[in-house]
Amino acid sequence: MIDRRGMLAAVVRHAVELEDDYVDVASTLEALSASGDTALVSPLHEALDRFLDDGNFYGRDLIARILAGIQGPAALPALLRASARDLHDDQDSLSAEIIVLLEADRATARRTVVEFATSDTPELRHTGLWALGFVAEAQDIELLAAAATAVDAAVRSTAIGSIPDPDGDDRAYRVILSALDDPDQQVRAAAVSRLGFTDRTDAVAPLAARVDDPAPQVRSMVAYALGRLCGADTIPALLHLLHDPDQHVRERAVEALGSVGGSAAVDTLLGLAAAEDPQLRAQAAAALAKAVDSDLRVSQHLVALAQDSEAAVRAATISGLSGSGVNASRWASLVAGLAADPDPVVRLRVAVAARRLPLDAARDILRRYARDPDERVRGIAGIELERLTGPNAR
């Protein structure tokens, strides 16, 4: 007979003592998660409470995984309550478990989440509003609109981020617009971000009105949001942000111009690509790669930037092209031409970009890099070769 309580005790001991590696308990964790043994639910809740009280987020995540595996969506309340306890970690693993449960049974999950989202306890309400963003329906706009005026700024910010798609819902759109004037910068940033993920052309004007927001975080998000909206009417605001006092905001504006593309944006980026400052040239190179299909001038300038005297510019050109979505055959020769670059950072970028090259070319480069004098290049080459030759190879 399988001693599952003993197996659970071993997982708990591992999370407390941290003497072994995760691989030593991985198989036990999987077996418990797949066991369907509901007799373990009570001791699992006890273990979860213990880890929460001890501030042990690693143990919390292990127990949450087992609970989710055994109970499925029925584990959602316990995991939401665990998420509401701040253990000063990013909660990436726990959030992933919760999202799987939310999507497994949206109707049931939504009922649970709404209870949390209307709680009188700010922490539970905040967690519920976050989760509601994954299962929200049009009818939830009233609940979210009310939360967007809450005293707690974290609640307001999360409510704005969870509002359903406002593309065809003017009520939702107005709630987001009102948050642009919120006294808290996190709330304003959330509203700006939400507008950037719409397809509403009328979102450009209210976003442009925030280019002088007192918070750099908000101005940076404005640049990002305008880049996502892409219309030519975004360019004046982005040109304004190019002169922002905050460097990160300026960098975001350059990136956004690349996303917008077109002759006006490319004119500005070509000017930056000719700057004396190599950092500006590098930013321009990455942005121009995104605009390569929007203006015939871009391709020839990218070739020149790939031969720039500064390694950072050459590396940025490769990274920009490999992340641009442009057919790899159009820039394969450019990347291959930099495979023997003397700078290891450039070779690192080539190693990462190789996965999108024709198979034979990619293998040739990566096999050469497996003997590269730089340890980082060798490491990336090994990982990428495994992608090409492993069981899940293309």
Image (spheres, rainbow, N blue to C red):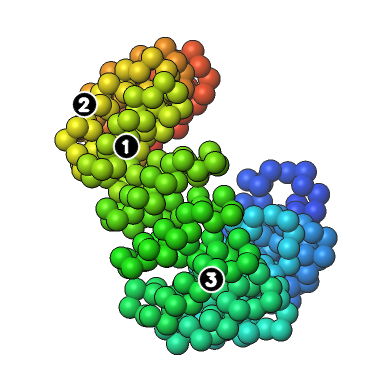
Q: Which residue is mark 1?
A: 268
Q: Amino acid at mark 1?
A: Thr
Nearest the viewer among 359 and 192 is: 192
Instruction: Label 2, secondary structure: give it.
Output: helix
Quarter of the figure with residue 202: bottom left
Residue 370 is at least partly visible in this image: no
Residue 112: percent from the left, percent from the top?
Answer: 58, 83
Residue 381: percent from the left, percent from the top?
Answer: 43, 26
Q: Amino acid at mark 3?
A: Ala
Q: CA distance from mark 3 to mark 1?
A: 32 Å
Instruction: Label 3, secondary structure: give it.
Output: helix
Asked if the residue under mark 1 is in contact with the one under mark 3, i.e. CB atoms within 8 Å, the reply is no
**Numbered circle sitting on residue 179:** 3
Q: Say which residue appears at 32% left-offset and 17% top-offset.
A: 307
Residue 192 lies, with reference to residue 259, above or below; the image says below
Residue 144: percent from the left, percent from the top?
Answer: 54, 80
Q: Which residue is mark 2?
A: 300
Residue 206 lies, with reference to residue 41, above or below; the image says above
Instruction: Label 1, secondary structure: give it.
Output: helix
Q: Amino acid at mark 2?
A: Gln
Q: Say which residue appears at 63% left-offset and 84% top-offset.
A: 118
Q: CA distance from mark 1 to mark 2?
A: 16 Å
Q: Within 10 Å of the Cα at label 1, are there few (<14), some (14-19), or many (20+) other Cα atoms?
A: some
Q: Is residue 124 left or right of residue 298?
A: right
